[in-house]
Amino acid sequence: MNYRFIIILLFIVSPARMLRAQEIVPADCPNKTQLEMQKRGYGMFIHFGVNTFDEKEWSDGTIPVDKYRPDSLDCDQWVRVARDAGFRYVLLVTKHHDGFCLWDSRYTTYDVASSPVKTDVVKAVSDACKKYGLQFAIYYSLWDRHEPVYQNADFGEYIDYMSNQLTELLTNYGPVCEVWFDGGWDKKPEEWRLPEIYSLVKRLQPHCAVGVNHTIVLKEGEREFALPDSMIVDNKYTFQYFPGDFRLWDPKIAHKQDKKQYLHDGRSYYLPFEHTLCISKAWNWFQKKALSPVRDLDELEELFYWCTDNDNTLVVNVPPDQTGRIREHEANAVIALGKRLGIKKGEPLPRNGSFLSLQSPAFASSVYENNELLYGAALATDGGMQTRWAAADTTALLTIPLDKDKPFNKIVIFEYCDTQNGEDGFSNYRTNRIQSYRIEIEKNGQWEAVYVSDEPMGDCKVIRFPYPYQTSQIRLNVTKASAPPSVYEFNVIYKE
Amino acid sequence: MNYRFIIILLFIVSPARMLRAQEIVPADCPNKTQLEMQKRGYGMFIHFGVNTFDEKEWSDGTIPVDKYRPDSLDCDQWVRVARDAGFRYVLLVTKHHDGFCLWDSRYTTYDVASSPVKTDVVKAVSDACKKYGLQFAIYYSLWDRHEPVYQNADFGEYIDYMSNQLTELLTNYGPVCEVWFDGGWDKKPEEWRLPEIYSLVKRLQPHCAVGVNHTIVLKEGEREFALPDSMIVDNKYTFQYFPGDFRLWDPKIAHKQDKKQYLHDGRSYYLPFEHTLCISKAWNWFQKKALSPVRDLDELEELFYWCTDNDNTLVVNVPPDQTGRIREHEANAVIALGKRLGIKKGEPLPRNGSFLSLQSPAFASSVYENNELLYGAALATDGGMQTRWAAADTTALLTIPLDKDKPFNKIVIFEYCDTQNGEDGFSNYRTNRIQSYRIEIEKNGQWEAVYVSDEPMGDCKVIRFPYPYQTSQIRLNVTKASAPPSVYEFNVIYKE
């Protein structure tokens, strides 16, 4: 055997080696599965099922199967929209908590095959993904409110049911890049036998990334969830669900300085975070009969950056309606977003600029209930999207010192809004508090307005300047508000 | 004398020929003066004077001269902003109705030279225009509420005063591309002796374009103004003020199909229209102490196109404040507008796309007071910015048939807003009526929403689609309004 022959042999062996399951092992950097996931970065989430036909977000497994009746089902359109929008994968809800299956499952009749419209949606979507060059991912609810064996004394019977269904999903539809497990809260974490399930997935789809919603908890063995905002220290929090390749806490947004090392059994694992957002302003996951406006493109753009800049990923939910098609106004919005971002196939995702105000001290004219801990000014610059500054009055100043040598040309403000829940218990409607405001910079000892508005701030206000400014201090001057103003994040950014 | 010598002589003579005054003569196409004006197209209007220091739009000539006291006067900054914003000329208010002169006039002491800040503003601005490569234009009020000779029995004395001042302005400050006369309403048109004044201007500045506000009337010799909206027929309306090189009707907006032939003494003259707009949302001409938000960039962009597309011109008022500087938030807005439009020096001004709905029939679910003449649906597509459709109910449909073969990718809606006047009697504050609405297109016999909003429409709503649509019908579906909705113009546009 000469030297050349050995080299040829190595090449032949390589593909097989690459297909060996990439299971999670202690590490402080992404493995190949995670790198591929980070490279994808931006996916379209699709919620569709019996809920779509009953104005529900969650249903209890009793909606009759013949309610599922899309009259113009067009899964090809879903994926075409995803491709045109620059999404790199489609994450399909194959089974929600209600147990209804979007494929023809041998193990239940609560599925499309038993419904009036028998199209295997999992097949149609995965085929379209192949056709349009996108990767395919599945969401699968652990919790099942329909399947009778779920209630059996021996929970192993349901684990078998689930394993069988996952085998169908991971065997019959080609490559699956990700499995997103949900509903784990209905049982103790260990009851789900995740090590077995995880191994099953990896055996069938070696490079499939696996995540379970509410992955991380404050203390090992306790069910106190760690919110994404708190995850700014490595090796402090621990897995609730182990093993897994990425973190989930739908629909929370991770901290700007999100950390990625988590403990299990005293060992540290690298885990990126996958964000979930809705295109709908009303935050509905399943489509409703009423048309809902989409979130503002400015807000979507900034959330895109926030969610993907930090080696994390984002899926945006764009749900088909009862006709079985994505609505045109949602399709054109998500496509407009992709064009605005300038996402290009095969290239890294676009990034935001540098954040000059991040973790800067901040000073406010007042703090709600004088509670610095809960509502202090610095919470508007801390990089956390769940923490916020709140004022005590309806006029207020929030002042942030800056490095005078560093130019900025964009301001992004995420205002805390009052929300009203919709009838489904999930959707919500936001109302701005800030009605009139200015952005002012310190110049020669005086405050100079660089932006003046008398319009409600909007869920995410983006102000782009045509040239950069430099100042030692910037402030938000709220001149009118319907309630004491409150701001999640006030970001001063320099973007090329 | 040989042949060569004759040619050389011709070259020597040419510049003198070109400087020969271009007076208005019957024509159906622009003369050189008008062509140059159309080529400029976009100017910055500057209102600054004693009014700036007294919270006034108009004053009566009694504000003491020492009230004029800018503490950081910086005319160079004004013109720098104009240049950065892509303006091609600066139109400076040299004397408003109050009679206060922004230059050191030999003929009055109601001027900057007698004030605490003696800078000759006309000189400073015209010098800066030369420095930054912009053309310089002047506004001069015919009406003078300060100058005592204005009240003399012999009005000729005031005509002399005015001629003397104009001689100063047109002699001492280099080239002046335009003179904008205002306030003619205070006397009978013939009292202003415009043929003399016009000849004076042309003698001193041969290619200076001259216009008098409220140029055109319905009938010769009568003082019934013809609104720009009605000027859609050539040779129907007549000069009130003759001669002149362009039309004015501040601050009205001309019809989309504005015509340019006007009669005087039975002969027809070509006359473009110069539009005037304020950068301020509150429509103030002179700056006030209170900071005012600027008009939305979308609105400014569409108004720019509307006002310049049709061989007409636009000046945007960006007034300095009491410090003597243009405010930073107004400066960055007008510069952002220029960048967004992509105005390039030496190149033709950017243009809007093609209007597919212009003069299309239109159908409404209701018409206010059933008055088709005043509020009929077709007034929303007629191309006129003063005419409008108004509904009778707070929900309403406005339907417009389109040519299905022609794609469109932009919708522009100018909504009629309720306005409240400010204390100065000029400024006004607009409130939208339309609170929630959809844009729907006809597709296979059904209405499909391509845009859904639950936010107040805004003074000018621009919806840009990421790809073109084609349909045989489009409609505005107003689902909620605070009063019966009303729309000046609903434009369906295809823009490359």
Image (cartoon, coloured by chain):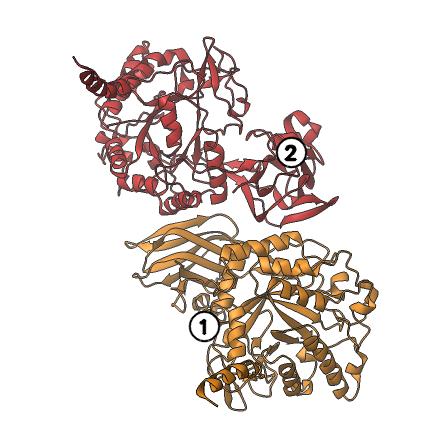
Chain colours: A orange, B red
Which residue does the image show at 44% across and 38% down from the upper left? B350
Residue A276 spot, x, y in % from top left: 59, 68
**Residue B398 found in image quarter:** top right
* Chain for disc number 2: B
Q: Nearer the viewer, residue A329 or B227?
A: A329
Please say whether residue A383 is visible from this viewpoint: yes
Q: Nearer the viewer, residue A302 or B122?
A: A302
In the image, residue A98 above or below residue A153: above
Quarter of the image where the N terminus of chain B is located: top left
Q: Residue furthest front?
A: A1
Q: Nearer the viewer, residue B211 or A196?
A: A196
Q: According to the image, label 1 marks what residue?
A: A257
Q: According to the image, label 2 marks what residue?
A: B390
Question: In the image, is B196 to the left or to the right of B282?
Answer: left
**Residue A442 found in image quarter:** bottom left
Of badges 1 and 2, nearer the viewer stands 1
In the image, residue A102 above or below residue B26: below
Which residue does the image show at 80% across and 85% down from the upper left? A152
Please rate how many residues cluster around mark 2, counting C-alpha atoms within 10 Å: few if below 14, some from 14 to 19, many from 20.
Answer: many
Which residue does the image show at 56% across and 77% down from the upper left? A247
Disc 2 on helix, strand or loop?
Answer: strand
Question: In the image, is A425 to the left or to the right of A398?
Answer: right
* Chain for disc number 1: A
In the image, residue B25 above or below residue A279: above
Query: Label 1 is placed on what type of residue?
Result: Gln
How far apart are labels 1 and 2 at the CA level? 52 Å
Please say whether residue A55 is visible from this viewpoint: no
Residue A79 spot, x, y in % from top left: 64, 61
Question: In the image, is A175 to the left or to the right of B75?
Answer: right
Q: Nearer the viewer, residue A28 or A214?
A: A28
